Amino acid sequence: MDDNRARYPFLAQWWRIGGVGGVLWVVLFFVSSIAIQGEGVYRSDSVAEIRDYFSDDGDAYLLGDYLIGLGFILGFLPFLAALTTLIGRTDGTSAMLGRLVTIAGVLTVAGGLAAAIPTGALAVGAAENPEVDDSSIRTLMELDAYGFASLSLAVGAFALSAGVAIWWSRALTWWWVSILAIIGGILAVISGAWPIDGDEEGFIGSLGFIGLPVIALFILLASINMIMGGGRADEVVVDKTA
C-alpha cells in the first residue's frame, strides 16, 4: 500500500479522487439530459407526441440515460464515498451523519435507476410497437412521473443530510456550501409532494426545477473544494457531543 502511494501520489489524496468524481457526475448529467436528450416529453403531452418523441429520438434518449448511469457509477459514488469519509472521521455525531449521507446517497442511485425504467422501455421499442396500446403508453408515463417524484425525496434526503453533516463537522473548508445543500434539499423534498395535487408543473412541482440545480451546484462546489485541498482531511476533529 505504501509503495502504491509513493508510485501514485494522487491516490494517497483520496479526497481529490472524490472531487473529480463529483465534477464528472455534474458534467455528464447536464450534458446528457440537456444536450443529448433534449426537452423530452411530459405526462401531460398527448400519446401521439410521446410516441413521436421516442420513435424519433429514442436512441439519443438511451445514450443520455447510459451516460447518466455512467456518471452515477464513475462520478457520484466516488464523490459520495469521499464526502462521507471526510464527514465521518470521528465517532459520535459526525460518524452518524456520515452514515446517514451514505444511506441517502445510495437510495438516490437506486431511485434514479428505478425511475428510468418506464421511459427506458418506451425508448427501447414500446413507443414504436403497434401492439402497445395508448393506455399502456399513458401508464408508463404515469409510472415515470411518480418515480421521479419519489426520486426527489431521495435526492432531497441526500442533500439535507449532507448539508447538515458538512455544517456540523466542518468537513470541508468551504463549509458554507452546506447552505446550498440544505436549501436545495428542502425544495426537492417539498417538490416530491406534487402527486398529491396532480400537477407536476404547478407550484409544488416547480420547486424541484429550482432545488435540483441548487443541489447540483452544491456537488460541483464541494467537489472543487475537495480537488483544491480535500477539506479538513488531515485535521483531528473533536466531537461536539463529547
Image (cartoon, rainbow, N blue to C red):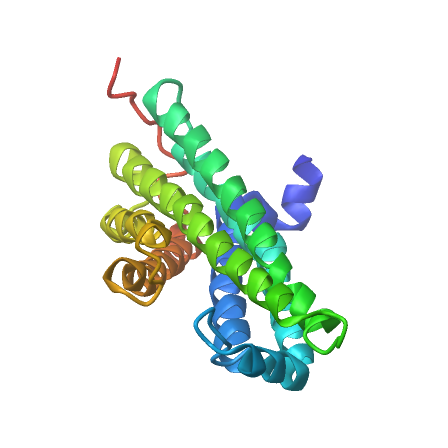
On the picture, is 22 further left or further right than 65? left
Res. 21 visible in picture? yes
In percent of the image, x 62 and y 53: which residue is there?
73
Q: Nearer the viewer, residue 24 or 17?
A: 24
Quadrant, the C terminus: top left
Q: Nearer the viewer, residue 218 or 109?
A: 109
Residue 131: quarter of image: bottom right
The x, y position of residue 225, in whole percent, is 36, 54
Toward the top, the furthest residue is 242
Q: Nearer the viewer, residue 37 or 93?
A: 37
The x, y position of residue 81, in whole percent, is 52, 41
Quadrant, the N terminus: top right
Image height of 220 relative to 97, above or below: below
Residue 83: quarter of image: top left
The x, y position of residue 60, in whole percent, is 64, 79
In percent of the image, x 26 and y 57: which residue is there?
204
Residue 205: quarter of image: bottom left
Res. 13 visible in picture? no
In percent of the image, x 57 and y 61: which residue is there?
139
On the picture, is 66 further left or further right than 50? right
On the picture, is 194 further left or further right than 85? left
